[in-house]
Amino acid sequence: MAAAATKEPSSDFAFEHVWRRSPLDTAGSCRRSRSFSSPSMSALKCMARAMSLMFLSMWIFLGTVDGAGKNGSALRPRIVNIGALFTYDSVIGRSVQPAIQAAIDDVNADPHLLQGTTLNLIVHDTNCSGFLGTVEALQLIENDVVAAIGPQSSGIAHVISHVVNELRVPLLSFGATDPTLSSLQYPYFIRTTQSDSFQMEAIADIVEYFGWREVIAIFVDDDYGRGGVSVLGDALAKKLSKIAYKAAFPPGATKNVIKDLLVEVNLMESRVYVVHVNPDSGLDVFSAAKYLGMMGTGYAWIATDWLSSVLDSIEPADPEKMNFLDGVVALRHHAPDSDLKKNFLSRWNSLKYKGSARPNNYGLYAYDSVFLAARALDTFLNEGGSISFSNDPKLHNSDNSSGLRLSSLHIFDGGQQFLQTILKTNFTGISGQIQFDIDKNLIHAAYDVLNIVGTSSRRIGYWSNYSGLSVVSPEILYLKPPNASSSNQHLHGVIWPGDNTKKPRGWVFPNNGKPLRIAVPYRVSYKQFVSKDNNPSGVKGYCIDVFESALSLLPYPVPHTYILFGDGIGNPDYSNLVYQVAQNNFDAVVGDVAIVTNRTKIVDFTQPFIESGLVVVTPVKRMKSNPWAFLKPFTLTMWCVTGGFFLFVGAVVWILEHRINREFRGPPRQQLMTIFWFSFSTMFFSHRENTVSTLGRLILIIWLFVVLIINSSYTASLTSILTVQHLTSGIEGIDSLISGNQKIGVQEGSFIWNYLTDDLKIAESRLVVLKNQEDYAIALQKGSNGGGVAAIVDELPYIELFLSSAHCAFKMVGQEFTRSGWGFAFQRDSPLAIDLSTAILQLSENGDLQKIHDKWLKNTDCSTQINDDQNRLSLNSFWGLFLICGITCILSLAIFFCRVFMQYRRFSPEDHREVEAVDTDPAPPSAQRPAARSSSFKDLIDFVDKKEAEVKEMLKRKSSNKGSKHQTGQVLDGHSDLSLS
């Protein structure tokens, strides 16, 4: 055992301490008396007083020690009473009794624990009775016990907790696992085992791990059973699961009562059972289940820790009992395999009062409970606490008015301090670490997950409140960061009832195989979706084929029968039909049922098998002749940009061709007409001017490509505009319907009526109920002013089917303004809805869903939607072409003007005038005037306007003139040299 806490002074030390104080006082007296006596007389008087005080101190000490157990003292008492409450003849009691006695012997034999104090154990038998157990508990507390170990019953613990609260006696229970005992109402109740709240969290994690949604709880109807099942319901709710049924039987129920209860639950849908009963009667549940054939394939049984307590106490295992436990998953309190535990188990057979072959975990917790009380008592005494009891005035006064001897119950004066000492105690026992959190629960709650196979059990994993399910020991996980994510939950393989390794589905059809009652709407319109038929099933249609195809993909048969809902005169009310499923009048609805918010609150839908949104349909006709129809293909912006580019490209080509192409020269008026003619003639590829320059040809090629695209698009758009049908009214979608006052048609029995009136706030006076496709066509043709409707609002599948037979007389306008779908409706939390959703997805992926659609539903050849703006071409469709053409033109102009500027720098206007003067009328040098050099804009324009050939000729003359002048200068220089010589 762990070393004892630091020891307080022993009784001998206390006596010595009292004895040492007297000489000091005597010495003081001696010193005070010296002034009044002679030295010899003073010494005699001091000695006499010292002897008197010493004998008085010894008398007081002996009297104190003799009455320490009754009157209390700050000294350590020789004997302290400690009580124990449990049922001797029970699975838990036969393991707990020798464990408690062994713990008492070990405490009293430990020289480092409770030095000088002996624990006196007082045991009372609760006899498996709430009444007798309460009486025995009161008799136990009459013995002035400082703590009580037990009880094992949660019911007795509830009653006794009120008593110990009043008398301040800590109650250390090793077996009362009811979570409600942890409330603040019972401050003196200390649970030295794990609360069932942790055990139920473990079961909820197991249920989630195997993918089950519902369980049936079988439990004993007492505080222990009800408390555990209540917590189980909360734990399952966190995992989006639930308890489908709570099957309770009374304590001490006979096998026939249990058998009748199991017959009842076997008729229900769920096949996952959680058994939370007492160890002494729990095996009767499985015996009855085996007799009823409920331990075969398809069943899943989960037992709480009571089952492991029974099995741990049996050695060797009883083959008959193990036979009807085959495949059960059970929990067991996790106790680490420490040396303390191994040593205790090795000497179990030599213990006194041994009633079971092996100790179960409750025996381990009982052993540690005694050591918890002993260690806390040692600390309590070391801190100066005293063991004393006093009368309770309330109980003393009650004796006068009743015959009960309640005054024999005393209050433990140090009970509050002792309670806090217990809660602060921390040590390692044979069951693991004993330490309490702020809620008075043991820290590190952990369980072994067992699987009963054959005549033994095997551990398939662990559960802890630190990391959930794991195949790794909790002691190893405590050294790592916590990780309770779903991806980190693991268990080894389980062998289920029937020696089956495949996980049970967890449910069957209710009423033990009776076929599902499936409601089918009895429609009078749109019978392609669902309708009455003379075949064996009685129904047919698109929805029926989808449902049957999905059922064929399930790995199990689904017996079902179709029941028509409606009178066959008008379409049924679909909201009422869904409500009938929620009221358990039907098990499901198969048909064209829209998935809307209000319906999802009361039933579960499968994955949608067809998309469905609300649309608007109106009548259409051919547009009358319009003299300005040719302008509609392009938007105004498109027209402006296209015309601008025609002029821009013509101007660019003229600039590039003007200097070198005779066809682009002439008077200004002629050149301006050339620009316009060339620009717009390219629209029809009929331009007669040839381009000579390389840059001009490049631009022309790109522009002709742009014109080709524009012409083709214009032609296609104009054709569509002149041939497509158009609306007879100004309705463009749901928004124009809301703002107007025209009549609106809705289908009989549909949710659309409520949607338009409640959500869109459309007056009911504007709505007209229509029964079938013929009513649709007649109402639309009459129009709102003629007693019909201006538009119909309905779901997309209906409208598509209606338009397919309307000969393009009606069209959808606008966009879908809701997004939903059709699904099959089931009762809430039905597992069949989940499996069918998976099957519908498989149908969609393998293409079968589309094949069924094509079989029953045909699409119209007419355009299903009209929007005039969509037929008009805007700049957004062509800005890329215009950008390419524009960049090419700008680059070409840049190259052209760079070239001209380079030529202009080599040529000046005065040079041009000098050349002209020499050619026309050469004047004598004395008459020539130097021309003023200028580079005006007019000169530049004149230069650009000149032909390319003229510019080259002038540049050539200028070069030759400079050469002749250079030769003349050399000749004159030679003549001057000769004359000088």
Image (cartoon, rainbow, N blue to C red):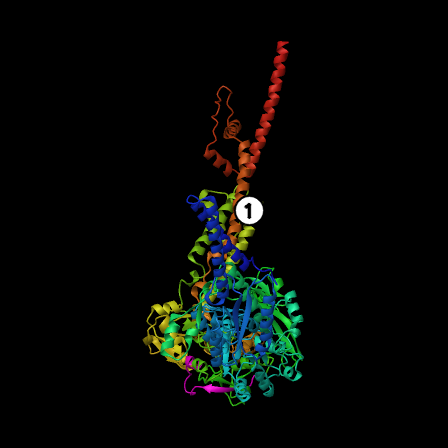
Q: Position of residue 352 (x, y in %)?
A: 62, 75
Q: Quadrant of residue 853?
A: bottom right
Q: Position of residue 852 (x, y in %)?
A: 55, 78
Front residue (pair 172, 788): 172
**Lateral position of residue 683 relative to residue 430, left or right:** left
* Residue at the extreme top of the image, as rendered: 981
Check disc 1: other Cα within 10 Å, few if <14, some if 14-19, many if 20+.
Answer: many
Identify the residue under disc 1: 696
The number of discs equals 1
Please tell me which residue lies in front, 160 or 251: 160
Q: Quadrant of the C terminus?
A: top right
Residue 46 can be seen in this image: yes
Q: Is residue 439 visible?
A: no
Q: Amino acid at mark 1?
A: Gly
Q: Which residues are magenta?
A: 557-577
**Which sits in the foreground, 740 or 482?**
482
The answer to which quarter of the image holds residue 760 is bottom left
Residue 562 on the magenta segment: yes
- Compared to residue 27, the image places residue 507 above or below, namely below
Residue 928 x %, y %? 49, 22
Query: Which image quarter is the N terminus in?
Result: bottom right
Q: Secondary structure at mark 1?
A: helix
Q: Residue 570 appears at what percent x and percent y?
A: 41, 85
Q: Is residue 582 above or below residue 958?
A: below
